[in-house]
Amino acid sequence: MIEILIATKNKGKIKEIKKILGELPVKLLTIPENDTDTVLEDGQNYFENALKKAKHYGKKYGYITLADDSGLEIDALNGKPGIYSSRFLGENTPFGEKIEKILELMKNAKNRKARFKTVAVLYLPKTGKVFSAEGKVEGEILEKAEKREGSGFGYDPIFKPNGFESSFSMLGEDTKNKISHRSRALQKIKEIILKELLGGGKMVEIKINGKRLPANKYVYEVFKSVILALIGTLKDIPEVKTVEITIKKED
């Protein structure tokens, strides 16, 4: 099975990514807890920051690596905090304090339009190939935070996406994962994984005890090649046109 390392230590991000990509027949790995590396995100845009993280951990551990960089862009603040969203007021400053500061800066703002942006990067260390995808969701900054315990993270409590009446945090993770900036970027990454790593998006029917497995064309082709290779070792076998196999587990 293909293994992909999620290049973040942010538990909220990890949870979202696993939820969105969980249906793929790949194994999603996380950075070891004893890893103390810090990647300096000094890029000029989201892509450069995401690429730095993906390359750092991809080269260190040798896995295909997925990283992203996201930011909240507020029109009244000239697009800030933007790519500095996680480092606004200092990287170790709690998001509660960051939110309070933004609400203070926005106190008299009539234009409360804002957007979340994400650029996700998939890095293949063996070949050096890089794939990227962008996601964006438009909305506005609320006048006060709306937070549901255990739902959302970062600036979610003060961002209300267009078409909804509550913050990302209040909407809950299921709704957020359908419409969020990260979800939109990762849906594109999912298609890239299917096409570039799994041999195409067409799923094939493989069942065990009547339960359909998430097997795609790549899995099918591997299975077929193994079976045909085994048949090729046998003698006095005519040209193979069809193969029917039944495997029963022995007690």
Image (spheres, rainbow, N blue to C red):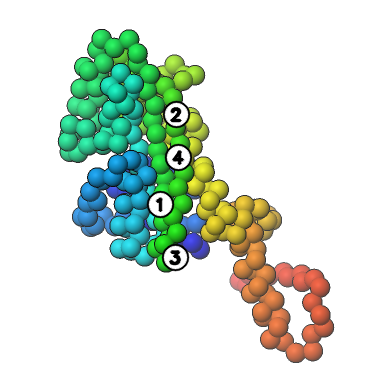
Mark 2 or 1, nearer chain start: 1
Residue 159 location in percent, x, y? 36, 23
Classify mark 2: helix, strand or loop.
Answer: strand
Q: Residue at x 36, y 65 (%)?
A: 62
**Label 4 sits on residue:** 134
Q: Amino acid at mark 2?
A: Val
The numbered mark at residue 127 is 3
Classify mark 1: helix, strand or loop.
Answer: strand
Q: How many other residues sit within 10 Å of disc 3, few (<14), some (14-19) or many (≥20)?
A: few
| Lateral position of residue 23 relative to residue 115, left or right | right
In the image shown, does 27 or 80 lie closer to the viewer?
80
**Label 2 sits on residue:** 137
Q: From the viewer's perspective, is the residue at label 2 or at label 4 nearer?
A: 4
In 3D space, how far apart are the residues under numbered discs 3 and 1 (Cα atoms)? 15 Å
Residue 189 location in percent, x, y? 49, 47
In 3D space, how far apart are the residues under numbered discs 2 and 4 (Cα atoms)? 11 Å
Q: From the viewer's perspective, is the residue at label 4 or at label 1 nearer?
A: 4
Position of residue 96 relative to residue 229, above or below, is above
Residue 29: image quadrant is: bottom left
